[in-house]
Image (tube, rainbow, N blue to C red):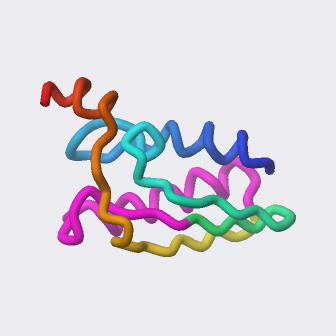
Amino acid sequence: MNKEDVIEVLKQCNDPELDMSVWFLGLIYNIDIDDDNIKIKMTFTTPFCPYGPHLIDMIKTKLKEAGAKDVQIEIVFEPKWEPSEDVKMALGL
């Protein structure tokens, strides 16, 4: 898998509350690929996101279905997530 493949999968992983992809929302901070082992650094919309475990499981499952051997996800809260102007518009803010 290459970075573009990973991004395409992430575009299919929607936050259940906002119904927008984790990629569009800007929740993915970094993607490292070594062979077919993928490490992702990401955040949630809030530290108390009730869907956090669900999002992690969904991302891991979809990436493995797409050919990843191993997927590791590191959750960080620095920098704090701020919605982009595109996300604000989509949310009607």
Q: Is residue 12 above or below residue 50?
A: above
Counting every numbered tag in the picture gives: 0
Q: Is residue 28 left or right of residue 77?
A: right
**Residue 87, image x and y in percent?**
30, 33
Q: Is residue 31 above or below residue 24?
A: below
Q: Is residue 1 left or right of residue 80?
A: right
Which quarter of the figure has residue 91?
Answer: top left
Q: Nearer the viewer, residue 57 or 39?
A: 39
Q: Residue at x 23, y 32 (%)?
A: 88
Residue 8 falls inside the magenta stretch: no
Which quarter of the figure has residue 71?
Answer: bottom right
Q: Residue at x 28, y 36 (%)?
A: 19
Q: Is residue 82 above or below residue 20?
A: below
Q: Residue furthest right?
A: 35
Q: Residue furthest left?
A: 93
Q: Residue at x 13, y 30 (%)?
A: 93
**Residue 27, image x and y in percent?**
41, 53
Q: Residue at x 82, y 67 (%)?
A: 34
Q: Is residue 89 above or below residue 34?
A: above
Q: Is residue 73 left or right of residue 85?
A: right
**Residue 38, image x and y in percent?**
69, 65
Q: Nearer the viewer, residue 80 or 18?
A: 80
Residue 53 falls inside the magenta stretch: yes
Q: Residues in magenta?
A: 41-68
